[in-house]
Amino acid sequence: MSHRYSKIKRDQRLLFSRNTRSMSRMYFVGLLTGLIIIIPIVTLWQFDDLQLAALKVVNMAPTATPFASDRAKQAEALFLAGDIEGSAVFWEQAAKQQPDNVTYLYEYGMVLVLLGRESEAIPLADRALAIAPTDPRGYALKATALMWSDPAAAIPIAINGVELDESFAPLHSALAVAYTNINRYQEAIEEGAKAVSYDPTDANARRAFHYPLLYTGRYDDAIAQLERAIAINPYIDAAYFELASLYRAVDEEEMALGIFQRLIELTPNNAKAYLRMCETYIERGYFQAGEPYCDEALTIDPNYGAAYAALGQLQYTRRNYEGAIESFQQCVAMGEDDVRCYYLRGWAHYFLAQCDAAWNTLNEGLPLADTAQSLEAVQLGLGAVQNNCPGYNNVALPTDVPPTPIPPTPIGGI
């Protein structure tokens, strides 16, 4: 009995073992078949991801294109950090990605105006107006771009914008500057006050308001507006130059030097700030103190024609005539039409007994004399050559050329 029972148990174990192996083989075959079918599908589905991962390993993965909104955020951050040119680059990229986005067109255009590239801002304004004719920003941008070069055209454009949105401060800022430039000072003051009232935190509104205040002799009020503009946005270079020029105009040279120093500390590679510092020292008669600032301006920008003119004047005043001639020649080579680079160079040649060079240089400068003072300097130089250079005793002086009429320059001009 026990033998039979043992045999039955053994046979059951064998049967179970056979069934298990059979089932295992079936499962294995099924699994293998499934993998054969599924793997290619999954591989195809994930091919792009797998390819990207492979490319990343060898640093060949494509760079994702930033969204326009990301570029706009970068532009805003750079602007707030004082990198106006960098901000313009990112606004341009955002506007190219979304050319129908009025916000991008407006912000890019306004930054271009700050950089003195008004002509480039006008097409952006026209596009904004075509896309959204009821949006005041297009009118504000175009009026702002025209307020200096064509104030008469800027005024009706800004007024059209005001009719759409009375409280949009940049429209009133443009009107304040445009009215100032056509001598309608009372209206300019009213518009400037509105701009500041509608947006007290707009640095450009403060700058715009200072112009009519300046022209009507309210210097303290103009200075206060510019100081406030700098406090709001310390990275607008033009505000520093305007404020320092105002201080120079009211004989506060020490204050002007302090303003330029603040700007240099903020932007150490600002060649224009070094030049203005040099010029302020020249005006005060501190020639030795001013020379390093002219030198630094040229170190930063070796092609800065205006800096060569100032350095030449400084060298001439210190009787370094050879150095002055070289600097003035560089001034002319850089395309500057500054009459100093001619009449002072002519005088420098005269003092070195270089009569031919003196006569020719002074004659070249005669048509450029744009003030009574510069015209007189040229004429006196020609007379000195005629009287003291034997070869020119009988040479007739050229016919007087009247000073070229030029529009009035703001006292706070930069």
Image (tube, helix red, strand yellow):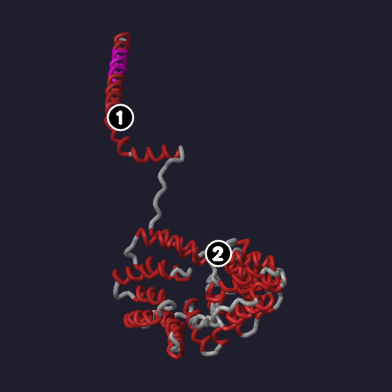
Q: Is most of the magenta stretch helix, strand or loop?
A: helix
Nearer mark to the viewer, of 1 and 2: 2
User: Where in the figure is residue 238, as x and y percent of width and height?
Assistant: 53, 73
Residue 253, quarter of the rendered image: bottom right
Residue 373 falls left or right of residue 389: left
Image location of residue 387, percent across then percent down: 67, 78
- Inspect this view and state whether residue 384 appears: yes
Residue at point 28% right, 35% down? 41
Residues drawn in magenta? 8-19
> Which image quadrant: the N terminus?
top left
- The residue that appears at 39% across and 60% down in the rendered structure is 94
Q: Nearer the viewer, residue 212 or 281?
A: 281
Q: How many marks?
A: 2
Amino acid under disc 1: Leu
User: Residue visible at 53% across and 71% down?
Assistant: 236
Say which residue label 2 marks.
Answer: 334
Image: 252 above or below 81: below
Q: Disc 1 on helix, strand or loop?
A: helix
Q: Earlier in the sequence, mark 1 or mark 2?
A: 1
Q: Which residue is mark 1?
A: 35
Furthest toward the front, the residue is: 394
